[in-house]
Amino acid sequence: MISDEEIGFFARNGYLQKRRLVDPEYCRALVDLTWQRLPAHWSRNEPSTWKGIVEDTCHTGDVNERRGHLRFQRGNVMTSDVVQEAFGINGKVGQLAYSLLGHPLAPMRTRGLYVIAPLEKTDDINPITNPHIEAHASQLIALCYLEKVEPQGGGLLIWPGSHRELYPSMGSKLEHVKTAEHDQIFAAWRKKAPIELHGEQGDVVIIHHRLMHAPNLNKTNRLRLGFLCDYERKDAASLCGQKPGDIWEDWPAIAALPRTMTDSPCDFQLSPIPDGPRLPQHHAQHHGASTVRSAAAVFARARQPGAIWLTISDSNKLGSSNKLDPLGSRIDSLSLGVSVNGKEIASQSEYDFVASVELASEDNRIEITGIDRPLWLRLLKIETPFANNKILHLQNLNPGQGVTTIRFEQPTLADPKITTQPEM
Ligand SMILES: O=C(O)CCC(=O)C(=O)O
């Protein structure tokens, strides 16, 4: 499906753009699905209507304040036959992923329909939005352009070559486990100017999971319509607990090429982002669920295997979930006092009480005061893959419970002794 030259290009630069890989009828079907989910007041041929408040899977907010970025996940896009036929592991895009990895694949993971709407005004805002690598485990991310993407029309921004320094700087082959070295390398890449990948309907941009990338602004008068999905090897879960070594250690198709094709310098020379007054990043005034989601993204990148996190929420939505995400009220409205082994601790999140805690080897005492409504407390131990995080303890806290004292005995932490004492 692809030539050795293309595989070598991917290895050196961290991406490949396959022109018109997805058939137009699949693209059109996904464009129709997107329009089913865009606001009813938006009309396909009238860009002047692409304004106002939009509800997508992540936020409800004004499209300009969101820099035009809309995501439609879950729902009908997850069950679409088109998605499986074109992007599933037996479809053309799945086969492309297989050609790069050279190892049987786990089922493709659909991320969703990603739209970038044109903005009314773009000159006073920072053109680069949130450069990142993914917070979740994956090896390849594929973005298909469902319609033509003109220059400055929302084509993906990428930093070619960044994967070669970022991959070995992480604490896990696949999970987002940060290290001090990673932070430094990432900060250095952020100072370079990215390249923009525009393209035609059906083009697939496939990137290495540690390639720094960012969604672009759209300065044209067409919507940037895209579909995003992830690929990884069948045995990806076992790679999550391993530390990275050589970048192509788990990519037999790339490791089989002569090293001159894969290890020679990147094909692009990125220039530094010019000094001068930095344009302010235009922050959307997110409300409710959207702000909580951005807090969750920060925590997703702060997980370290073995760490123990204490979370207290007034939302029971997480139930017995082992995710770190805050989902409840602002911390300042909770007025909680939390101390671990006599030392008061602060929440590291604006929403819910979320803090990483150091526990002693035995007999730990966690005291909670100020319980004014039903709360849900969890102690989570971070494990790799992060999907396997262990819930060490889950407990309801009720108003009027006074000082709730939870005692844990290490090392098992399996059977905490819980006592409740009257408030002093
Ligand atoms: O929609 C895009 O162009 C990029 C999306 C992206 O960077 C991401 O979700 O990781």
Image: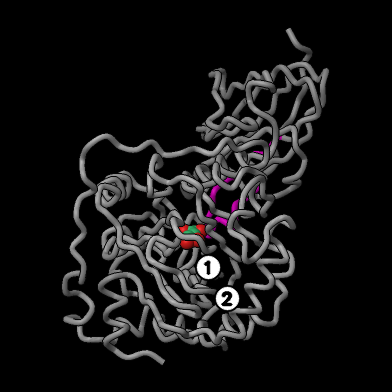
User: What is the x, y in percent for residue 101?
Assistant: 41, 80
- What range is drawn magenta here? 377-391
Q: Is residue 343 above or below residue 412?
A: above
**Looking at the rendered structure, which numbered label has been put on residue 341?**
none
The quadrant the C terminus occupies is top right
The foreground one among 411 and 110 is 110
Magenta span contains residue 245: no
The foreground one among 227 and 362 is 227
| Quadrant of residue 420 within the rendered picture | top right
**Looking at the rendered structure, which numbered label has been put on residue 108?**
2
Q: Which comes sooner in the sequence, label 1 or label 2? A: 2
Task: Identify the amino acid type marked 1.
Answer: Ala
The quadrant the N terminus occupies is bottom left
User: What is the x, y in percent for residue 235?
Assistant: 51, 75
User: What is the x, y in percent for residue 366?
Assistant: 63, 26
**Could you tell me which secondary element the residue under label 1 belongs to?**
helix
**Could you tell me which secondary element the residue under label 2 belongs to?**
loop
Query: What is the residue that sits farthest to the top in this orientation?
Result: 424
Left or right, 375 with respect to 247, comes to: right
Left or right, 105 with respect to 266, comes to: right
**Looking at the rendered structure, which numbered label has been put on residue 237?**
1
Can you see residue 144?
A: no
- Name which residue lies at 29% across and 60% down: 162
